Image (cartoon, rainbow, N blue to C red):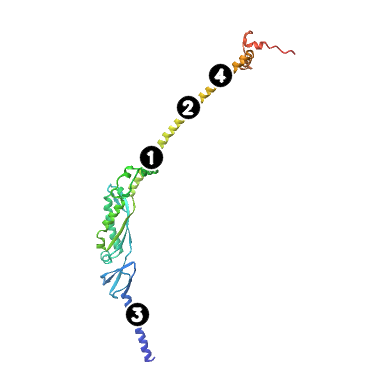
């Protein structure tokens, strides 16, 4: 191998080494901040300068400084359900959620370091505020809205659907209401949070609200008892209505029968009168034939197969029989 070839090989190796070194330097000196991120530069573990909030390519000292990235978007916080007594000593299970963002990455890093630490700190702050607010508020104020205006029509509809309602609770004036309570929780929990932790609490909501298990059983039993009471009331009213209907039916039936009997008597009387009139007319036309006809009818009614009469031979009743002459053979 010639001297020139050796020199060219050494030169190529040096170029490669220098290129690798330059690339390593550039990769350690440059970093990119995403649109949804913000960054804090650390030197030997300590923050240097202000947080980097502008997206794009940025520089730092290689090998000496490192970059910590933090999200700028809204982040979710979901607390564990808590059992809290209300002002009226009703124990309820309340489940809350919140949305928060990092507004000061440097303060955030110094106070809670990362999102896990922030979640833990939010647990303490929000749960404490929720407990204080709920324990000083009546249950109806937590459940109902302050701007809900109950009128007679609403009460009638509710009563028609449920059968029974607690009208005192429905018409009770709401001073705070659920929306106002949530705003107060948000305001109280947000105090000093940006300055202390670099966090902005954007929203707090109550996801679920219910009685605790032991109280829920009592409420269900009370609801069952109330339904049974309503059922008994309906049943009693139904029986009373049935008795009323039966009584009216019996009365109407008696009236119908009485009217029918009256009409029957009237018709029967009119028929007897008409029959008497016809008999009188027949009698007036031919008294003898009338007497004969009536006597024959009497024979048919009185004389039967096993009838035995003991009468005098001169009895008027037998005068037509006595006048019968045997037919000559």
Mark 2: which secondary structure? helix
Disc 1 versus disc 2: distance between alpha carbons? 37 Å
Q: Observer-nearest residue: 51 or 276?
A: 276
- Sequence order check: which comes first, mark 1 or mark 4? 1
Q: In the displayed structure, would residue 89 be above or below residue 27?
A: above
Residue position for label 2: 255
Packing grade of label 3 (10 A; few <14, some 14-19, many >=20) is few
Q: Nearer the viewer, mark 2 or mark 3?
A: 2
In the picture of the structure, the residue carrying the numbered disc 4 is 273
- Circles 1 and 2: CB atoms closer than 8 Å: no
Q: Position of residue 97 (x, y in %)?
A: 32, 57
Quickly name the residue at label 1: 230
Earlier sequence position, callout 2 versus callout 3 = 3
For disc 2, the neighbor class at 10 Å (few under 14, some 14 to 19, many from 20) is few
* Number of numbered discs: 4
Point out the tag, 1 or 2, that comes first from the N-terminus.
Answer: 1
Q: Residue at x 27, y 50 (%)?
A: 135
Report the Cα–Cα distance between label 3 and label 1.
87 Å
Mark pair 4, 2: CA separation: 26 Å
- Element type at mark 3: helix
In the displayed image of the protein, which residue is found farthest to the right?
A: 329
User: Where residue 77 sits: x, y (%)?
Assistant: 32, 59
Closer to the eye: label 1 or 4: 4
Q: Which mark is residue 20?
A: 3
Q: Residue at position x 40%, y 36% from top?
A: 237
Q: Which mark is residue 217?
A: none
Dot 1: element: helix
Using the rendered view, name the quadrant where residue 195 is placed: bottom left
Residues tagged 4 and 2 counted as in contact (Cβ below 8 A): no
Locate residue 152: give its quadrant: top left
Q: Position of residue 91 (x, y in %)?
A: 30, 49
């Amino acid at each position: 191998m010639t001297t020139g070839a050796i020199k060219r090989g050494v030169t190529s190796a040096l170029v490669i080494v220098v290129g690798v070194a330059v690339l390593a330097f550039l990769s350690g000196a440059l970093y990119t901040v995403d649109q949804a991120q913000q960054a804090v530069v650390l030197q030997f573990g300590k923050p240097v300068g202000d947080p980097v909030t502008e997206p794009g390519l940025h520089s730092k000292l290689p090998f000496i400084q490192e970059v910590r990235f933090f999200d700028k978007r809204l982040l979710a916080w979901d607390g564990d359900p808590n059992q809290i007594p209300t002002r009226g000593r009703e124990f309820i299970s309340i489940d809350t959620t919140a949305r928060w963002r990092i507004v000061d990455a440097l303060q955030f890093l110094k106070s809670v370091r990362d999102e896990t630490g922030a979640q833990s700190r939010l647990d303490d702050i929000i749960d404490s505020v929720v407990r204080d607010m709920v324990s000083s508020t009546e249950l109806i104020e937590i459940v109902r809205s302050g701007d809900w205006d109950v009128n007679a029509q609403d009460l009638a509809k509710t009563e028609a659907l449920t059968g029974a309602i607690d009208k005192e609770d429905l018409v009770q004036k709401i001073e705070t209401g659920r929306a106002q309570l949530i705003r107060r929780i948000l305001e109280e929990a947000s105090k000093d949070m940006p300055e202390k932790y670099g966090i902005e609490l954007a929203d707090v909501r109550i996801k679920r609200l219910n009685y605790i298990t032991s109280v829920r059983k009592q409420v269900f039993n009370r609801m069952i008892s109330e339904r049974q009471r309503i059922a008994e009331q309906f049943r009693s009213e139904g029986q009373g209505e049935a008795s009323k209907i039966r009584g009216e039916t019996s009365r109407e039936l008696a009236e119908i029968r009485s009217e029918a009997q009256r009409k029957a008597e009237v018709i029967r009387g009119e028929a007897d009168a008409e029959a008497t009139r016809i008999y009188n007319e027949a009698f007036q036309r031919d008294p003898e034939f009338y007497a004969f006809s009536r006597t024959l009818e009497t024979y048919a009614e009185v004389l039967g197969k096993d009838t035995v009469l003991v009468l005098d031979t001169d009895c008027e009743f037998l005068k037509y029989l006595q006048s019968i002459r045997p037919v000559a053979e």
